[in-house]
Amino acid sequence: MPELPEVETIVRDLQSLVSGARIEDVSVVHPDLIVGDPAEFARAVVDREIVGISRRAKNIVIDVGGDRLVINLGMTGRVLVVPAEAVEPSHLGVRFSLADGRTILYQDVRRFGRLQVMDAATWKARSGALGIEPLSSEFTPEHLYRMSRGSRSAVKVWLMDQKRIVGVGNIYANEALFRARISPRKAARRLSRGESERLHAAIRKVLQESIDFRGTTFLDYRDAGGEKGAFAARLRVYDRESEPCLTCGSAIRRIVQAGRSTFYCPLCQRG
DNA sequence: AACGCGCCCTGTCCGC
DNA sequence: TGCGGACAGGGCGCGT
């Protein structure tokens, strides 16, 4: 479900809500969500303090005093901070009871998400295998241009590969290509320097704008307080099949690439 | 080695 | 009203 802006929003929420909190108890309701042994997972986080919270790609990374609790939300995962008396939601996966009485809930209807505890060195290696952060200063137009050389994949599919650029999923791949006026079918290696520059700028702009609006709620996404993001109203092509292009009025088209829906304007995004 | 596909799972919506 | 099929912010493991 969540792409970079949604995960970033949750991480910032968690930073203000639970930094410094102590985890007093853990109960794993759905063991299939845990990578590794669930009992070991519970032991590794109980009686630990939440020292820091950060985002890497689409992962929430919680420093529990050396070890890292890494949460990937899959399609429908939510991390919710709730008061002691709160009614628990359906599809509860993991419950973290805090010493102050509040609870952090991991909820996931489809259970595509995963939670894992690992030591800092293991996490460092895992993180190193992921692609570049698109909002970092290391990510430049030149970087995008060079990475795309040699890839025969359609640029839309290429953009979603987390080993290259992280955090861009189906919604923002569609939106960035529309803003850059590039056809989603174009082979990545055929991007010109000018197109690489436009795409680089469009990726950063759409991700940053969405963060400013606390992410896109298409169906399931909620922030750590259970609220929807407001960016859905600002999407220009995603889920707008047959509706008029906001630039030229042409009907937005939907095609399928690598099993995922692609939305684009056939006029604004030619060649 | 890069790339495409099927699969993991539940819920919702649409057409018949 | 019921039922089958398609589809939904992701990612892994497989085959070629």
Image (spheres, coloured by chain):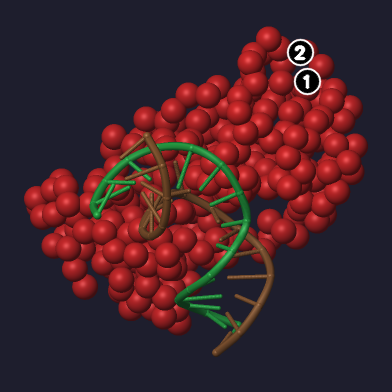
Chain colours: A red, B green, C brown
Name the kind of residue labelled 1 in the image.
Answer: Leu
* Element assignment for label 1: strand
- What chain does badge 2 belong to? A
Q: Tell if the residue under mark 2 belongs to the same chain as the one under mark 1.
A: yes
* Residue A82 percent coordinates (x, y): 64, 18
Q: Residue at x 26, y 59 (%)?
A: A254
* Residue A183 percent coordinates (x, y): 26, 67
Residue A149 quadrant:
bottom left
* Residue A246 percent coordinates (x, y): 15, 46
Residue A100 quadrant:
top right
A233 shown above or below C13: above
Q: Is residue A5 left or right of residue A172?
A: right
Q: Kindly identify which residue carries mark 2.
A: A101
A75 shown above or below A8: below
Labels 2 and 1 touching (C-beta < 8 A): yes
Name the kind of residue labelled 2 in the image.
Answer: Gly
Marking on residue A149:
none
Closer to the camera, A269 or A35? A35
Closer to the camera, B2 or A144? B2
Camera sees residue A55: no
Q: Residue at x 10, y 55 (%)?
A: A250
Marking on residue A98:
1
- What chain does badge 1 belong to? A
Residue with the most extreme top position? A85
A11 shown above or below A202: above
Q: How busy is the neighbourhood of tag 1: few (under 14 within 10 Å), some, or many (20 plus)?
A: many
* Residue A166 percent coordinates (x, y): 53, 56
Camera sees residue A150: yes
Q: Residue at x 21, y 73 (%)?
A: A271
A187 shown above or below A128: below
* Element assignment for label 2: loop
Residue A259 quadrant:
bottom left
